[in-house]
Amino acid sequence: MIVTTTKGDMDDSLLEHRTGEFEDDNEATVWDEYWLDGELVHRSAHIKLKKMPSFAGGETATF
Amino acid sequence: MANTQSMCTSFLGELMLGQHQLGTSTIVSRGSLTSPTTDTLKAALYLASATINAATTAYTATGEVSGTNYTAGGVTVTNATAPTSTNSSSTAGVGYWTPSASLVYTTVTLSTAFDTVLIYNSTQSNKAISVHTFSSQTITAGTLTLTMPSNTTTTALLRLATT
């Protein structure tokens, strides 16, 4: 697979692939990193928002 | 300084003035008596060090991210779903709306940590709508995708309720 990096497009076989994830009540996030010789050359993130902003102490704006 | 997730307070009053049209065109616009139009909404990213919150009344370039392939002002929000309202009882109800597609910032490099997206109405003088925070991120020659929650009475991105 070809990966867009700070060094240009590279085959992923040349790179170290690291992934991570984070989840709480507000979001579910995953990220992909590609490293070349200890240098971060690509990082993408996918964030799924779970809820609307709180407002006036509640989950919704109330009237 | 920090960003705080909230619906923007000014947005509530502006709704009563009819200054925002979310979703599909359903009413005659304020600019034309014959041709309904939908407002263009945009989504701008802000640094973790910025101060964007309920008191934010309009888009500002102060504290906005900058970097390769990121355009100041952010991306356009796909605004194709009309707001929905429903009663949960004889005296309570909720109106809700969610963008109809993910917000995608493609092949960007944003080296300084950011944690906030501001949704605002670029048709109506960049009036602020809502602030959404998330875990601090950087992007390197990559894509940031913000996927919207399900458009339901309990999870929609924007919800206005009576109790």
Image (cartoon, coloured by chain):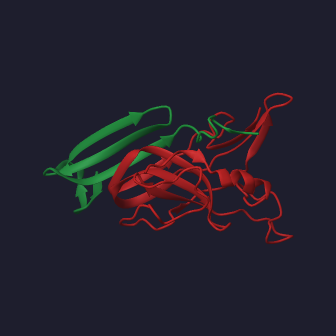
Chain colours: A green, B red
In depth, the one of B21 and B129 nearer the eye is B129
Residue B158 appears left or right of A35: right
Query: Which residue occupies 28% across, 54% down?
Result: A42
- The total number of labels drawn is 0
User: Horizontal placement of A43 versus B123: left or right?
Assistant: left
Q: Position of residue B88 (x, y in %)?
A: 78, 29
User: Relative to the observer, which residue lies in front, B133 or B55?
Assistant: B55
Q: Residue furthest front?
A: B1
Q: Which residue sits at x=72%, y=62%?
A: B38
The spot of residue A30 in percent (x, y) is 38, 40
Residue B110: percent from the left, percent from the top? 35, 59
Where residue B90 sits, quadrant-wise, is top right
Q: Position of residue B106 (x, y in %)?
A: 42, 59
Q: Is residue A63 above or below residue A8?
A: above
Q: Quadrant of the C terminus of chain B?
A: top right
Point 25% across, 61% down: residue: A6
Q: Among all residues in the image, which is located at the extreme left?
A: A37
For the residue pair B8 and B97, the one nearer the viewer reads as: B8
With B133 as the anchor, is B55 left or right in this view?
right
Quick check: B160 left or right of A24?
Answer: right
Residue in the picture at 36% in, 36% down: A21
Looking at this rendering, what residue extends furthest in the top direction?
A: B89
